[in-house]
Image (cartoon, rainbow, N blue to C red):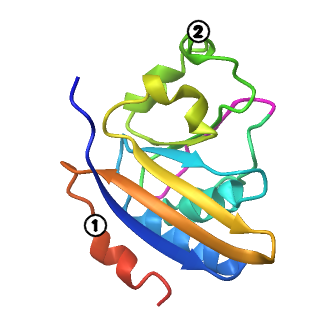
Amino acid sequence: MTKQIYQERSYFTDSVEQTYAFGERLGEILQANDVIALLGDLGAGKTTLTHGIAKGLKIKTPISSPTFTLLFEHTKSERNIPLYHFDAYRLTDENEWYDAGFMDYLDNNGVSIIEWADRIKTVLPARTIWLSLKSDLNNLDWREFQLNVPEQRDFAWQALENWQE
C-alpha cells in the first residue's frame, strides 16, 4: 500500500466571522465529489466552518450540526452541487458507516463534509481533503486550520491566499 502524500497549508482566523469567511472562500472552490474530513475538538469551529462552506456552495437551506441525525442533505444550491453534512461522532466503527449506506454519498456529485472523520478514516477515499481545526483556550476567537490536500489534486490554492479580501 502506497502512503498518501499531501500538499499542506495553514490558515489562521481571529473571529467567528473570519472562520465563516474562510469557509465561504473554501466552499467557492470545492467541486462535485469533494470529500472534506474535519478534525477538531468540541467547540473548535467545525459547524461554523461548514456554515461558511455552505454559503460558498450557494446552499439555500439552514445549516446545523447533524450530531443526532448523522447526516443532513442540502440539495438546493445555485451551483447545483449538493452538500452532504455528516457527523461521525456517535459511530462506534466503520461498519456503522457502511451499514447506513453513507459511502454512496461520497460519489453522488455533491460535496461531503464529515465532522469527526478520524472515527472512519480507514474507509474514506484517497481523494479526501483533511482539514484540522485547532483552537486556543486562552483566545477563544483564534483558530488554526491545517488543510491537507492529496498531492495529485489540482487544488485552487491561489483562491485561498487572499481569502480575507
Q: State left or right for residue 58 relative to residue 29.
A: right
Residue 60 pos. (x, y %): 62, 57
Magenta: predominant secondary structure element?
Answer: loop
Q: Which residues are magenta?
A: 68-78
Query: Which picture quadrant has residue 47?
Result: bottom right
Residue at 39% x, 75% y is 160
Label ID, residue 99: 2
The image shows residue 121, relative to residue 37, as above or below, that is above
Residue marked by disc 1 = 156
Residue at 69% x, 66% y is 135
Q: Are marks 1 and 2 in contact (CB under 8 Å)?
A: no
Residue 158 pos. (x, y %): 28, 76
Q: Was residue 71 drawn as part of the magenta stretch in this picture?
A: yes
Residue at 74% x, 38% y is 66
Residue 39 pos. (x, y %): 59, 48
Label ID, residue 6: none
Residue 85 pos. (x, y %): 61, 41
Q: Was residue 89 drawn as part of the magenta stretch in this picture?
A: no
Q: Nearer the viewer, residue 140 or 96?
A: 140
Tell me the distance, in whole angstroms, between the alpha carbons under discs 1 and 2.
34 Å
- Residue 74 seen in render: no
Q: Nearer the viewer, residue 139 or 110?
A: 139
